[in-house]
């Protein structure tokens, strides 16, 4: 640890951020590996000079420096005890783009997908398409010599790097590329000539010992130093740096070779196999057809993917029968060539003896996928392979250490058989997937690394596996690099002489061992438990939780297991697509991403962040920008549910320290809403008089620039349902309308619209509770504040009132996604049991109910609705639809499309938006409004402003409508309002009878219950 004076000097000399607190250091203590080392400090440089300053000071203090991009390394490359330097946040620019020359110079922190998004309009891309492209940086890719699924065609990162500039360990700047001759006095001429001499000296040994597979990323690329006698290509020093894992030099600018975008004409042949070995034997024959990639998924992966809602539709679209393994064979050439290739693929599969309907060991064949959207979804599914596996909730987890060995294709079947047998001998098993075309399959045996015996098993498996790989002349490190987990085995794999050469390279570049020591050379044992995330003595604090966490294992009723689900793969760091994690997309701060929060929680509860870390202000800060959007619940491949965890943390803090004034004010809104109606004049005044707004900010922390919602005198009452109740002679069914706090008191036209539409469509509508009672409430506002006990009380009341309806088989239809979906989500952990399950199964959003009825052929608007059966055509309208985060998390967006299809003339267009940024109370907070507005400006507000003035804007979330109203001049509607407007002057059908009264109405008033 640095002394105070050194810390201050760093803060003074570095323009970027400098952190020495335990919370920040803890967030940088892990990557996607099994290791964890607390660094001495974290630097987030704003400019390249900061990197030089950090390096100089680390040298002064005798500290190691470890560079970091997305921190997605699987072998422990980015964990170390010195300074961690995070390039991803600020050093992420494209410095130069030469379109005709097909080259670009980038800073190391740029994320691959972001770079490719910028290149796309120019018809170019960086073609190393790794699975983590949404968050991996070019600096990290060069560090690890990363390899994409299409490496068969494009090679590895090394093959696509032209030159690298940066800093050597002594602080001197370098610019390494092709070496065309060494002029005396040229910078680093001595170092370069030493390396060239080493290449010449070791040429024969390299030829003998380096594996003859494309996927070899272990050790230093000293083969790049060997002159190529066959071609004129000069030695490229940048290729030695590629794959050196930040141990030789720091890159600050990387020159890349770009490729033309691949043909959009692609076809995927999904080859189905009846058993795993058959697929492995077939791989070499399929590769001979010249595809761009051949990727594997096995049966376990398919069945795990089936349990994840976001993959169900994709799987149903291309999986035929129950294959034991599938190989995805991609051709990306001209349409004619693709057709010819896919025909050859059919022939090859047939020659190998496979055909659909042949049954038994011959059951199999090719499913052709020509639809680019489906092919992209299949690609996503394959890329999510590891994460799908990691979604196992048990204490044992698939562990990465023999994950990416590569063997020549002719040995693939024997290799996988033998490794499976090794796993079996150690009482475990693994799931296979990934790059069959390169003989580089991913597999992770399931182990519980909290147990010493499983750590021993890991080492024993690694030794046996690497022996076998060496026998096949394969590579023990075929994709993910060396880090801690693989480096100690270099001597076994490359031999003593080349291992000494690796050490010579390290010593020449970094004699004092400042740059990421202990990786590639001088490595510790891979099974040193003191370096692991779960070291000996690891214990998770037992706390009384507010939620039920029993779906997971471990202490605190399973909360431990839920927190430990995060494997640090970094999918939450993506900057586009989906919704997770919206606040990170604004701040780019590791603290504000799901991973950062999960790591902080794990460290706090395992005693690594000091006493009472759970209740600390630092923990509150860590959780502050989580908007509770639930996107992680759906999009985090391992299902880390940070929205619920945040509620738990707020609950724990509240129990210990009490709740804040603003939190209580917002949480209790369902109880005092009737009073707010009385005070609505005063609330309106606050919105108009800046002095009052400032006062509100000072006293309650409510941002002065945010308008407060208007409470309505004509709030929606339960007895309106009875008054409007009708029953057509042929009613399609009964429903219960669940009016929530927000629409009831602030936008009563919405429940009225829903009521009108449901009745117009012939449904018998029931009130959720008796008019004399205090209206029902889902407890959402309490949950947002962490008042889990209060939320549970509301949930209990609501469950009790709704159960008679549920038992009568009536769907419960709600309007506000965050409220209705609480019945399907948090109720299950607030009140676990059969009743909550039954209610969850019966609770539907308005659009889900309509969609369900449309699909069942039961939903029909009256014939005199324009465009239905009358002669009046419906005016065509485009509806721009913004989905509420909870709608998206629940996978309910498809229902919007289906429901809107019942409206004549309406063409829905889903806005490609993330979170609106309002997120309940978040958008009102004086300290969070800035992020709230920036989140809205990422996509939603620009899209709404760009919408045609005549178009409809639909947003079902009350917060989303509020943000749109505050940020644009548009008025967004709830879908129920759009339906009601379509009815126009159409009246209700003739009334025949009121709906049956509630089976078990609750007597008496309950205003203050
Ligand atoms: C789920 C999952 C799937 C994966 N799939 C693939 C895959 O398909 N193909 C593949 O090749 N890998 C894969 N990986 C591994 C990893 O994602 C890649 O190696 C990735 O390129 C790392 O990028 P990063 O930005 O996260 O780098 P980091 O992990 O942050 O760093 C990687 C290395 O580069 C060094 N480094 C970073 N910046 C610099 C710099 N400026 N100067 C010098 N050194 C630097 C670091 O010190 C470290 O040694 C996968 C990982 C996971 C978790
Ligand atoms: S929170 Fe989920 S997506 Fe993010 S790193 Fe952890 S496991 Fe991956
Ligand atoms: S709930 Fe939303 S904001 Fe919070 S961690 Fe999950 S994705 Fe991020």
Image (spheres, rainbow, N blue to C red):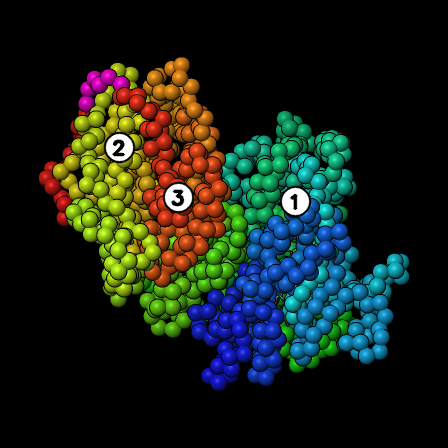
Q: Is residue 875 above or below residue 126?
A: above
**Nearer to us: label 1 or label 3:** 3
Q: Residue 383: which numbered mark, if any?
A: none
The x, y position of residue 145, in whole percent, is: 68, 60
**Nearer to us: label 2 or label 3:** 3
Q: Residue 969: which numbered mark, if any?
A: 3
The residue labelled by disc 2 is 752
The residue labelled by disc 1 is 295
Q: Is residue 368 above or below residue 763?
A: below
Q: Residue at x 23, y 45 (%)?
A: 711
- Ligand 3 contact, mark 2 (Cβ < 8 Å): no
Q: Earlier in the sequence, mark 2 or mark 3?
A: 2
Tell me where residue 269 sits by quadrant.
top right
Tell me where residue 141 sits by quadrant.
bottom right
For the stretch drawn in magenta, what is the main secondary structure? loop
Mark 2 neighbour class, 10 Å CA radius: few under 14, some 14 to 19, many 20 or more: many
Q: Earlier in the sequence, mark 1 or mark 3?
A: 1
Q: Which residues are magenta?
A: 989-994
- Membership of 968 in magenta stretch: no
Q: For the residues marked 1 and 2, what is the alpha-carbon distance in whole angstroms?
A: 53 Å
Q: What secondary structure is marked by label 2?
A: helix
The x, y position of residue 479, in whole percent, is: 66, 57
The x, y position of residue 889, in whole percent, is: 42, 44
């Amino acid at each position: 640890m640095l002394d105070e004076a050194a810390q201050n000097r760093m803060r003074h000399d570095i323009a970027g951020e400098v952190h020495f607190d335990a919370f920040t250091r803890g967030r940088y203590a892990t990557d996607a590996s099994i290791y964890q080392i607390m660094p001495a400090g974290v630097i987030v440089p704003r400019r390249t000079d900061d990197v030089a300053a950090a390096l100089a000071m680390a040298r002064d203090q005798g500290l190691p420096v470890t560079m970091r991009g997305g921190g997605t390394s699987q072998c422990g490359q980015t964990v170390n005890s010195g300074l961690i330097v995070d390039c991803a946040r600020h050093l992420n620019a494209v410095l130069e783009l030469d379109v005709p020359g097909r080259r670009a110079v980038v800073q190391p922190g740029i994320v691959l997908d972001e770079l490719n998004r910028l290149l796309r309009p120019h018809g170019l891309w960086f073609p190393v398409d790794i699975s983590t492209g949404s968050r991996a940086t070019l600096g990290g890719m060069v560090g690890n010599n990363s390899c994409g699924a299409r490496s068969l065609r494009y090679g590895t990162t090394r093959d696509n790097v032209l030159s690298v500039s940066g800093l050597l360990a002594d602080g001197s700047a370098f610019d390494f590329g092709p070496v065309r001759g060494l002029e005396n006095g040229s910078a680093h001429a001595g170092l370069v000539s030493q390396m060239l001499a080493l290449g010449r000296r070791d040429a024969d040994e390299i030829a003998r010992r380096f594996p003859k597979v494309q996927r070899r990323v272990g050790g230093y690329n000293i083969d790049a130093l060997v002159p190529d006698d066959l071609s004129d290509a000069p030695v490229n020093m940048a290729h030695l740096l590629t794959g050196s894992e930040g141990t030789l030099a720091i890159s600050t600018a990387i020159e890349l070779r770009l490729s033309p975008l691949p043909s959009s004409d692609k076809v995927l042949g999904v080859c189905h196999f009846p058993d795993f070995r058959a697929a492995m034997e077939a791989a070499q024959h399929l590769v001979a057809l010249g595809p761009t990639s051949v990727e594997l998924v096995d049966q376990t992966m398919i069945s795990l993917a089936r349990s994840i809602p976001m993959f169900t539709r994709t799987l149903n679209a291309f999986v035929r029968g129950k294959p034991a393994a599938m190989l995805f064979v991609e051709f990306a050439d001209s349409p004619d060539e693709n057709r010819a290739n896919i025909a050859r693929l059919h022939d090859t599969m047939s020659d190998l003896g496979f055909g659909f309907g042949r049954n038994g060991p011959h059951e199999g064949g090719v499913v052709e996928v020509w639809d680019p959207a489906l092919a992209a979804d299949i690609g996503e599914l394959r890329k999510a392979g590891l994460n799908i596996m990691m979604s196992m909730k048990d204490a044992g987890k698939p562990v990465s250490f023999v994950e990416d060995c590569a063997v020549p294709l002719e040995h693939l079947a024997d290799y996988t058989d033998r490794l499976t047998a090794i796993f079996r001998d150690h009482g475990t098993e693994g799931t296979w997937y990934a790059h069959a075309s390169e003989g580089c399959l991913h597999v992770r045996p399931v182990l519980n690394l909290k147990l010493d015996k499983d750590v021993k098993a890991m080492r024993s498996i690694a030794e046996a596996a690497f022996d076998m790989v060496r026998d096949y002349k394969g590579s023990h490190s075929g994709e993910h690099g060396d880090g801690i987990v693989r480096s100690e085995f270099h001597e076994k794999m490359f031999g003593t002489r080349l291992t000494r050469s690796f050490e010579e390279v390290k010593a020449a570049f970094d004699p004092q061992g400042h740059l990421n020591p202990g990786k590639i050379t001088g490595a510790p044992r891979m099974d040193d438990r003191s370096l692991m995330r779960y070291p000996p003595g690891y214990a998770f604090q037992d706390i009384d939780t507010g939620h039920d966490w029993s779906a997971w294992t471990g202490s605190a009723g399973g909360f431990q297991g839920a927190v430990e689900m995060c494997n640090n793969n970094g999918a939450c760091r993506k900057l586009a697509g989906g919704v997770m994690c919206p606040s990170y997309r604004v701040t780019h701060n590791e603290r504000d991403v799901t991973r950062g929060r999960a790591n902080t929680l794990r460290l706090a509860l395992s005693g690594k962040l000091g006493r009472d870390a759970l209740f600390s202000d630092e923990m509150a800060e860590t959780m502050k920008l989580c908007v509770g959007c639930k996107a992680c619940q759906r999009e985090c491949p391992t299902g880390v549910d940070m929205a619920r965890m945040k509620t738990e943390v707020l609950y724990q803090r509240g129990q210990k320290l009490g709740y804040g004034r603003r939190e209580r004010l917002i949480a209790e809104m369902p109880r005092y809403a009737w009073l707010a109606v009385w005070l609505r004049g005063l609330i309106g005044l606050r919105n108009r008089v800046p002095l009052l707004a400032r006062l509100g900010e000072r006293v309650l922390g409510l941002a002065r620039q945010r308008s407060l919602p208007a409470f309505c005198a004509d709030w929606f009452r339960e007895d309106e349902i009875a008054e409007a109740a009708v029953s057509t002679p042929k009613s399609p069914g009964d429903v219960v309308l669940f009016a929530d706090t927000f629409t009831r008191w602030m936008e009563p036209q919405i429940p009225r619209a829903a009521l009108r539409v449901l009745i117009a469509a012939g449904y018998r509508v029931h009130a959720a509770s008796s008019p004399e009672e205090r209206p029902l409430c889902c407890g959402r506002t309490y949950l947002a504040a962490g008042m889990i006990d209060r939320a549970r009380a509301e949930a209990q009341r609501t469950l009790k009132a709704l159960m008679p309806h549920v038992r009568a088989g009536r769907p419960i239809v709600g309007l506000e996604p965050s409220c209705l979906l609480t019945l399907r989500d948090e109720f299950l952990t607030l009140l676990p049991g059969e009743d909550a399950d039954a209610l969850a199964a019966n609770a539907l959003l308005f659009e889900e109910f309509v969609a369900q009825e449309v699909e069942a052929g039961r939903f029909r608007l009256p014939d005199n609705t324009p465009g239905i059966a009358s002669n009046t055509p419906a005016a065509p309208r485009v509806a721009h639809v913004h989905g509420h985060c909870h709608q998206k998390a629940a996978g309910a967006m498809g229902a919007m499309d289906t429901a809107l299809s019942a409206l004549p003339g309406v063409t829905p267009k889903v806005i490609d938006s993330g979170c609106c940024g309002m997120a309940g109370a978040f958008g009102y907070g004086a300290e969070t409004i800035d992020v709230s507005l920036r989140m809205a400006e990422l996509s939603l507000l620009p899209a709404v402003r760009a919408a045609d003035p005549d178009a409809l804007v639909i947003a079902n979330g009350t917060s989303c409508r509020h943000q749109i109203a505050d940020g644009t001049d548009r008025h967004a509607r709830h879908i129920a309002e759009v339906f009601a407007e379509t009815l126009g002057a159409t009246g209700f059908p003739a009334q025949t009878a009121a709906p049956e009264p509630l089976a078990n109405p609750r007597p008496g008033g309950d205003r203050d219950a």
